[in-house]
Image (cartoon, rainbow, N blue to C red):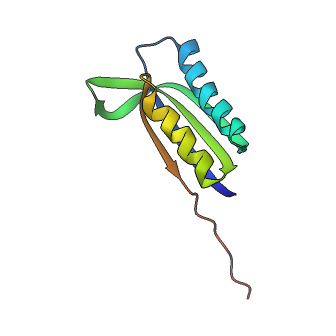
Amino acid sequence: MRRYEMMILIKDTIEEDAAVAVFDRAKEVLAAQGGTLLDEAWWGKRRLAYEIDHRDHGFYGILDFEASTEAVAEVERQLKISDDVIRFKTVRPEIRVHARS
């Protein structure tokens, strides 16, 4: 299993409780696929850096987790079909190894 970070951007046209439910659903899918949640952050409603589909605000959530590539693919598939998700981005954080002197 590899470590990943995922940022999820949810439409601001829904209530915050509904946006949190979308975020929680992503965590549930991850757990069902055998992934391990290491950390999470709910940033709430924030201004976007640029407009997306004529929107300038959205709800942000960040997941830090370990999972297989198949689990990541399933979470991404679920996010793609959700009408409330504007964008998401999954990255593998850079692991820094210090050389010994």
| Residue 93 drawn at (x, y percent) | 58, 58
Placement of the C terminus among the 4 image quadrants? bottom right
Determine whether 24 is above or below 90 in the image: above
Determine whether 15 is above or below 53 in the image: above
In the displayed structure image, the side of residue 37 where residue 54 appears, left or right: left
In the displayed structure image, the side of residue 56 where residue 26 appears, left or right: right
Residue 8 appearing in the image: no
Give the quadrant of residue 96.
bottom right
Residue 17 appearing in the image: yes
Q: Residue at left 65%, top 55%?
A: 3
Q: Residue at left 56%, top 39%?
A: 75
Q: Residue at left 58%, top 27%?
A: 23
| Residue 39 drawn at (x, y percent) | 70, 41
In the displayed structure image, the side of residue 67 where residue 85 appears, left or right: left
Q: Nearer the viewer, residue 50 or 86?
A: 86
| Residue 2 drawn at (x, y percent) | 66, 58
Q: Which residue extends farthest top?
A: 15
Q: Which residue extends farthest bottom?
A: 101
Determine whether 100 is above or below 82 in the image: below
Q: Residue at left 47%, top 44%?
A: 89
| Residue 37 drawn at (x, y percent) | 72, 42
